[in-house]
Amino acid sequence: MTTSMLDSLSEDRSRDVQLAVLENRNIPEAALMRLIKDRNLRSSVIARGNLSTQLMVELEKDESTRRDVIDRLDNNPMGWGRSQYGTPPDDFVELLRTWAHSPNQHTRIAVSRNAATPLELLEELAGDETLAAHVASGFGTSIANNHWSDGFRLGKIGWYKRYLSDSDLAFMAASSSPTLRAARAGRHGGDATVLDRLAGDPEPSVRTAVGQERMGRILTALGTCG
């Protein structure tokens, strides 16, 4: 289907036709701009992704579409940053850098807890007391209390919200931000001597994180022995 035909169909009054047009990856941006003006289609347009960086910047600035942009940031449907295979594309990282300085606090919060946000940017954001807790949350774990897989009940399981390589862990351990150092103390892997060094950190929050991590390891060991 040609782009001119898609552009024409985007003006169709049928909602089913409009949604079908949205599913086509070749839809021209002019048609997207037309459809996004419809409040009932706005979230679908944003959720489909594949929007230009400039368009996403403009959508975040608009109060009528900002909420949908933030929801997409929070949901992170592509899973960028959550595993070693989820490397975010450069244009998305640039969006995060732009939105990190948005005048809207809700946007900055969404960037603070997104798994694809670069560590050096999180270090900067964590300097804002209102954002530090959200940065810390982005390094936490997600829990499923009643997880099933292939018909087998696995019970309660947890997984990290963000993948961290050894170089990421080293960056966090040496970070000027207590938030990032505390997050490093709460993660396994990397240099085994890091906890010893962070145990003498001048910030109480970092020392607390070290204590909690060590206690967790002791309890895990006791559970294994039992």
Image (tube, rainbow, N blue to C red):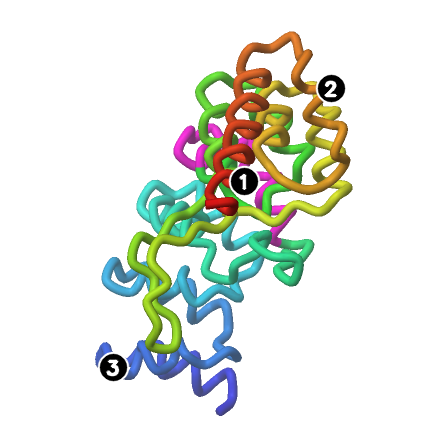
Q: Which residues are magenta?
A: 92-109
Decide which of 106, 66 is in the foreground and name it.
Answer: 106
Residue at mark 1: 221
User: Which SS class for mark 1?
Assistant: helix
* Residue count near mark 3 (Cα–Cα under 10 Å), binned few <14, some 14–19, many ≥20: few
Magenta region, main secondary structure: helix
Mark 1 or mark 3, earlier in chain = 3
Mark 2 or mark 1, earlier in chain = 2
Q: Name the amino acid type tagged 3.
A: Asp
Q: Give the CA distance from mark 1 to mark 3.
A: 57 Å
181 vs 99, left or right, is right
User: Which SS class for mark 3?
Assistant: helix
Decide which of 92, 178 is in the foreground and name it.
Answer: 178
208 vs 42, left or right, is right
Quadrant (top left/top right/bottom left/bottom right) for the C terminus: top left
Q: Is residue 99 magenta?
A: yes
Q: Which quarter of the picture shows residue 12?
A: bottom left
Q: Give the CA distance from mark 2 to mark 1.
A: 22 Å
**Residue at image point 59% right, 18% down:** 206
Q: Name the amino acid type tagged 2.
A: Arg
Farthest residue, direction front: 226
* Residue count near mark 1 (Cα–Cα under 10 Å), binned few <14, some 14–19, many ≥20: few
Q: Name the amino acid type tagged 1.
A: Ala
Q: Which quarter of the picture shows residue 153?
A: bottom left
**Residue at image point 59% right, 23% down:** 210
Residue at mark 3: 16
**Residue at image point 27% right, 62% down:** 38
The x and y percentages for residue 44 are: 34, 65
Residue at mark 2: 197
Decide which of 83, 129 is in the foreground and name it.
Answer: 83
Q: Give the CA distance from mark 2 to mark 3.
A: 60 Å
